[in-house]
Amino acid sequence: MSSTTPLLIAERLCVRYRRGGRIINALDGVTFEIQSGETVGLVGESGSGKSTAAKAILGLAPVHAGSILFDGKDITHLSFKERRETYRQVQIVFQDPYSSLNPSRTIGDTLSEPLEAFGERDHKRKRDRVYEMLDRVHLPSTAVDRYPWQFSGGQRQRIAIARALMPSPRLVILDEAVSSLDLSIQAQVLNLLQELQVTSALSYLFISHDLGVVRHVCDRVVVLYRGRVMESGPALSVSGRDSAHPYTYTLNEAVPVPNPNAQRARRAAVGVPLTSLPDDTTKIRDQQCIFAPRCHWNQPQCWRERPLLRPAYPNGLVACHRYPEWRSEIARPEPHDAIADNGAQVIRN
Amino acid sequence: MSILTDQIAIGPATHSYESARSLIRSPVAIAAITFLGVVTLVCISAPVTAPYDPLHQDLERVLSSPTAHNLLGTDTLGRDVLSRLFYGGRRSLLSVLEGVVVVVALGVPMGLAAGYAGGWVDRGLNKFAETIMAVPALIIVLVVLAVLPQNEDAAMISFGLLGIPAILRVVRSATLRVREDLYVAAARISGLSHLQIVKRHIFPRVWGPVIVQASLFAAYALLFETGIAYLGLTADPSTPTWGGMVAEASTVIQRQAWLLVPSGTVIASTILAFGLLGDALRDAVVRGEGGSINRVPRSVVTARDRDADTAEPMNGRSGLVLRARNLSVSTMRSGAEIPIVDGVSFDVYAGETLGIIGESGCGKSVTALAVLRSLPQGLRAIAGRVYWQGDDLLSMTERSFDGLRGSSLAYVSQEPQSSLDPTFTVGNQLVELIRHHQRVSRRKARSSAIALLRQVELQNPDQVARAYAHELSGGMAQRVAIAFALAGRPKLLIADEPTTALDVTVQAEILGLLRRLQRETGMALILITHNWGVIADICDRAVVMYAGQIVEKSGIQEMFDRPLHPYTLGLLNSHPSLAEPGSRLSSIPGNVPSPGSWAPGCRFAPRCRFVAEECVKTPIPLIDIGPGHASRCVRVDQIFAKASA
């Protein structure tokens, strides 16, 4: 296996659910890859299919079409036994550190579980490995005999990370793994994840709605909207101001920057309304741009023809008929949208 | 209430011993267990404990009342009633055991299978359960007894089989609930087999309801067993059974009414004990799952001042809407008063937005709820004043406060769905609310309701008015909640993390909406958040809270440009967008201390990289540094000298 072969390739992945007679395309032809040692971000709003992609990789969502290759091996459809084998290599950390740990089992029980599942019987080896892992996530070894409720959210998330690393996986899916944590704790856990990535040679699939965090930790980012890839490319390009897709632009502009003057100036300068728009009942045809109903720059073509991913900037792909023209139209803000909030600086005693 | 579980480290008490402990505290349960224990023990050891042979007849002493010889009298053939009760109980209790074992041994695995596997397994087992429930139990058992005459074991086993549906359904629904927990998914991805997952992660969480169900089933089984024994279907008349003794007594009820008392009482009290035990177990299981925070009396907001100098009413300064002084909230835990919010003071002016920022557990939400006099159970505002146009909100009567709540003071929470009643349409609730605040006709209220929904930028106000809470998306629900808050035309809106659960695009819209409404109505806004971006976007001033105290307050640009407390600095630096991508984030070591474990000096000292000797000795006051800027740091001059130079 040459070193350039991606660790994971998702190829035109489709996941469909049937809900009340309607077919919902949770994923509609999603393609992306993860290189060894790389962190790839999956971003999008709720309902964009981020978590469905994670479930598909883990075999927890019904893949209707397309394929997933892990280390060159097709893992799209596997028997339960084969699937278990892949869990040695692919692990996940969930968002909610409260419900992801069984409240009635000690941390030691929880951590040794993956080892037992893969046939480790030797008590001492198990215990040593648990201690080693606790140390690596910076928790004291006394944690072994304690219960989840005795830990804070950040500590629980460290435990969940330790559990994911027990089978020595090569790919860890982080499904909004830091989203529910407080800022100072989030920073601790992000630092820990970066540390572990180096020491354990991990690849991450980093699922998040927070572009600020994604920009910080990811090498590449894939932007999803209602089950389709809108844009993908290097993190700094995608999350910067030169993003190639109107949706990415909308997402970027919506994140408030932590600097009052800059944020207010930015808000006043945004030339387009940041619509969250359509209710789910909007009928989406297969042959159209799925973002067209929300897009400020849509044209008749966007309603007739599904845009395919095409090269945009170095290593970047975009699915937009109007790229790059639409970008030149940002510069002209429409007067009624530029609500000048004078942001009166009220400083009082 | 998530505020409590998040912020006070009581933790969700879902441990089995929590249930066990609350069971021990219940006198009814104790009595039931003791009674059943004694009965079982006596019956098992009947050959030793019974004074006579239960079959020994003494025709000279028939139908005697209790005597020193025969403590409970004798029956129609002069047999000792007490001894017959002891021996009869052996058969009855064995029958109960048979029934319960069958029902648990078969019903529980079936319920686990139905709930865990789902799909056709679930459908098949449900059909099976429905079929059994359609069968008349008594008739089936009579058929069994007709085929196998006087075979009580067969009768009880078939009774157990017929009892499966009830326990199957209980276990199935409990399993369905647990199966959705993330740790079950995590266990699967850990590589556990289905059997291991069920054994380790599902069953320990459903056995509570199983015990309850088994106990209640035992009561039914005993009732049934005595019933068929009464009918003489199970044993030849000479064998003592509780049911048979009742049957015998009822034939001579005219001559010796007493004979009915011993057997009747034993049967009734045993059934009652099983039933009560089941109820007590159910309560204990519910309590074990629901957390155990209500050990403190119901919250009554009573404010009493600690310091006289805090009494500083609004001195006619223009635009002041709300002034909080020395607001303190505490809870009682194992007899000690634990402070949650400690001496918080702030002012809010008309038309401005005051941000309250801090991590969870620092007392942001509790501060807001204290101002609104809506503290969750167990928390009490123990000191301080909150002035509203010269009156203290905390000490005014419930009646006059109700007049303010909703009209002058409004609240929007992080979970907008929770403020909506699921059984009424949005429109109806809004109409009710408007009519509560203003005396207007229903039609007029209806049109104001639509106008309000339009005001919060809902695209289809008429359609939303006809919708129920569950039909709204998160963003729509938050808009509706804001419309509700605006119904009374408030002067102050307190929004607790109003955008935390929303997508960034929706967040941007909601913040824009709040800004527009504020411009139009001139209302003041207190916005609680942990997001610096939101603070930067909408606030005019901000206070930073840490461990129940305000550690810094200042104008908004000043706070970002020149933070003067190490906590503020650390929190700002933790923000990923302020760091070089891929670099190590500067984080604050350690965790927010939980209430009750706050350091005596500076509460941030244990996590502070600038900590010095003077920090840890005495409590640190909030020190004014410049115009409108205050910091609770004694070393502010040394630490920030360079920054301000």
Image (cartoon, coloured by chain):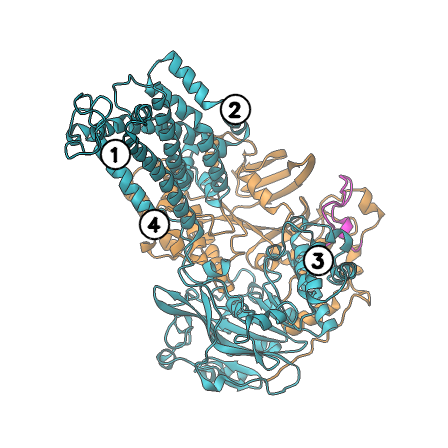
Chain colours: A orange, B cyan
Secondary-structure class at tag 4 = loop
Mark 3 or 2, closer to the camera: 2
Labels 3 and 2 within one chain: no
Labels 4 and 1 within one chain: yes
Residue stretch rendered in magenta on the structure: A277-297
Q: Which mark is residue B40?
A: 1
Three-letter code for the amino acid on which mark 4 is drawn: Ser
Residue B308 sits above or below residue A50 on the image: below
Q: Which residue is mark 2?
A: B134
Residue A116 sits above or below residue B462 on the image: above
The alpha-carbon separation of the residues under discs 4 and 2 comes to 37 Å
The alpha-carbon separation of the residues under discs 3 and 1 comes to 75 Å
Secondary-structure class at tag 2 = helix
Mark 3 or 4, closer to the camera: 4
Q: Which residue is mark 4?
A: B26
Three-letter code for the amino acid on which mark 3 is drawn: Tyr
Q: Which residue is mark 3?
A: A249
Graded by Cα atoms within 10 Å as few (under 14), some (14 to 19) or many (20 or more), the crowding at tag 1 reads some
Three-letter code for the amino acid on which mark 2 is drawn: Ala
Graded by Cα atoms within 10 Å as few (under 14), some (14 to 19) or many (20 or more), the crowding at tag 4 reads some
The alpha-carbon separation of the residues under discs 2 and 1 comes to 34 Å
> Considering depth in this image, is A157 or B373 the residue closer to the camera?
B373
Secondary-structure class at tag 3 = helix
